[in-house]
Image: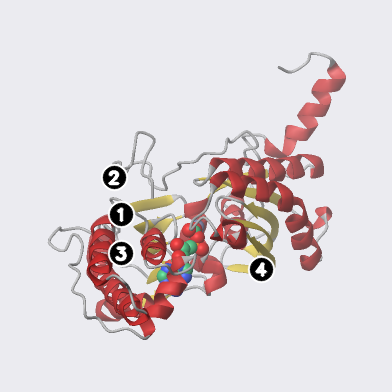
């Protein structure tokens, strides 16, 4: 509760001045400089981005990966992630500011990923960033991690709206129509596992390392597609995705081949990856068709983001769909496709430049769908879709 002692109130009001709900808009065209923090999963990241929508520059982009902390467990352990973020977040932010050569006086805004993600890590990063904003008397923007991913092509390529995104990461698998800032329509998404999760589980089953995606891709390179796995949801219209059945098919194939030779592992990986590529080719084409129904104009591009988009075979599959549809294919550099804070800073910069109000009181949220109007998907649980 606020004290009614004038001195205390005055202090609080001054500190809240930059985060008031009706903040004045940034003058049109003004260059902004945003410090952002990202801690939603196993990357502790901070970045400084400056400029204006359509002309942004990354001044620094620091990512401290916790992969080694989680490798022994074959996946991200939320409690370990939160503790590791607590240990590193201050140093990572310091490094981002130092390598950008930026002082508090140069900053116009502070931002952080507020969700969706692992709640412990989100609380660490967003609390730190809010405290930083308060102490520097700067406005704070809470950022949706998924929005940061889908706006990345605007940072890297200045892609104009509207465009179609395939977001394929360790925690997500969905197709999104990006019609404008804050105007997102989920065209389809996974009804069970995320895309990267499917790679990670396949790798774990076959005794390959974590993260599984690169290990599966490496093994697949020397394998042949001698296993026939059916393409999930092949006869279902629309562009929903599914990976759980494929995971079971991989397990059955591995059990039938046991004990597994390196050659058998390579063949299973090649067959799994080729099936995911077929799934993505089919569903991405259907996503582009669904796009026409929600957008007044055609997409300016098909965009692939998320760690899974690093996979060359999957990238080629998406590129071929874009070519067939006569749409440009945009795949941002890998460092900006995977989790990073530059995309968070860029998303905040877009909102600030649009004159939206900052919000210091926004709470961290483990679930925060991009498209609040989309129906919850199967397996989504009470609080919304998981992946
Ligand atoms: O986007 P990201 O770095 O983090 C999340 O937001 O989840 O994605 C990480 C995921 C992991 O599941 C990893 O196995 C997968 O991306 N991944 C790949 C490849 N490289 C990373 N999956 C398939 N092929 C790859 N080359
Ligand atoms: Zn992500």
Q: Report the residue marked by disc 3.
A: 297
The disc, 4 or 2, on the residue closer to the chain's N-terminal end is 4
Q: Report the residue marked by disc 2.
A: 377
Spatial CA span between label 1 and label 2? 8 Å
The disc, 2 or 3, on the residue closer to the chain's N-terminal end is 3
The disc, 4 or 1, on the residue closer to the chain's N-terminal end is 4
Q: Report the residue marked by disc 1.
A: 190
Of residues 47 and 54, the one nearer the viewer is 47
The disc, 1 or 3, on the residue closer to the chain's N-terminal end is 1
Spatial CA span between label 4 and label 1? 32 Å
Spatial CA span between label 1 and label 3? 26 Å
Of residues 308 and 224, the one nearer the viewer is 224
Spatial CA span between label 4 and label 2? 36 Å
Q: Report the residue marked by disc 4.
A: 58
State the image coordinates of residue 358 (x, y, percent, origin top left): 63, 41
Spatial CA span between label 3 and label 4? 30 Å
Measuring 74% from the left and 56% from the top, which residue is drawn there?
93
Of residues 187 and 122, the one nearer the viewer is 122
The disc, 3 or 4, on the residue closer to the chain's N-terminal end is 4
Measuring 65% from the left and 53% from the top, which residue is drawn there?
37
Q: Quadrant of residue 308?
A: bottom left
């Amino acid at each position: 509760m606020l004290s009614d002692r004038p001195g205390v109130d005055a202090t609080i009001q001054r500190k809240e001045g930059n985060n008031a709900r009706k903040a004045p808009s940034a003058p049109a065209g003004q260059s902004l400089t945003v410090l952002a923090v990202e801690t939603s999963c196993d990357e502790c990241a901070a970045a400084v981005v400056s400029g204006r929508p359509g002309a942004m520059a990354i001044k620094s982009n620091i990512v401290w990966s916790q992969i080694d902390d989680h490798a022994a467990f074959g996946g991200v352990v939320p409690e370990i992630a939160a503790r590791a973020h607590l240990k590193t977040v201050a140093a990572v932010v310091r490094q981002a500011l130092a390598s950008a050569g930026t002082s508090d006086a140069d900053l116009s805004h502070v931002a952080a990923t507020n969700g969706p993600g692992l709640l412990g890590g989100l609380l660490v990063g967003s609390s730190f960033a809010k405290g930083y904003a308060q102490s520097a008397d700067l406005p704070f923007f809470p950022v949706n991690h998924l929005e940061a991913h889908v706006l990345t092509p605007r940072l890297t390529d200045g892609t104009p709206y509207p465009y179609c995104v395939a977001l394929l990461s360790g925690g997500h698998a969905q197709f999104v129509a990006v019609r404008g800032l804050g105007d997102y329509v989920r065209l389809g998404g996974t009804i069970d596992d995320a895309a990267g999760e499917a790679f990670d589980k396949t790798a774990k089953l076959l005794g390959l390392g974590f993260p599984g995606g690169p290990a599966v891709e490496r093994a697949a390179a020397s394998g042949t597609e001698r296993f026939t796995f059916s393409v999930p949801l092949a006869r279902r219209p629309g562009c929903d995705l599914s990976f759980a059945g494929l995971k079971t098919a991989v397990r059955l194939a591995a059990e039938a081949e046991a004990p597994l030779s390196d050659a058998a592992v390579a063949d299973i990986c090649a067959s799994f990856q080729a099936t995911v590529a077929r799934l993505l080719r089919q569903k991405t084409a259907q996503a582009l068709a669904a796009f026409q129904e929600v957008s007044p104009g055609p997409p300016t591009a098909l965009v692939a983001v998320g760690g899974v988009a690093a996979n060359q075979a999957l990238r080629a599959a998406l590129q071929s769909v874009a070519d067939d549809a006569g749409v440009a294919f945009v795949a941002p550099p890998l460092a900006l496709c995977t989790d990073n804070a530059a995309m968070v800073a860029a998303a905040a910069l877009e909102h600030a430049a649009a004159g939206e109000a900052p919000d210091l009181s926004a709470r961290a949220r483990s679930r925060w769908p991009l498209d609040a109007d989309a129906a919850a998907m199967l397996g989504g649980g009470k609080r919304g879709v998981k992946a």
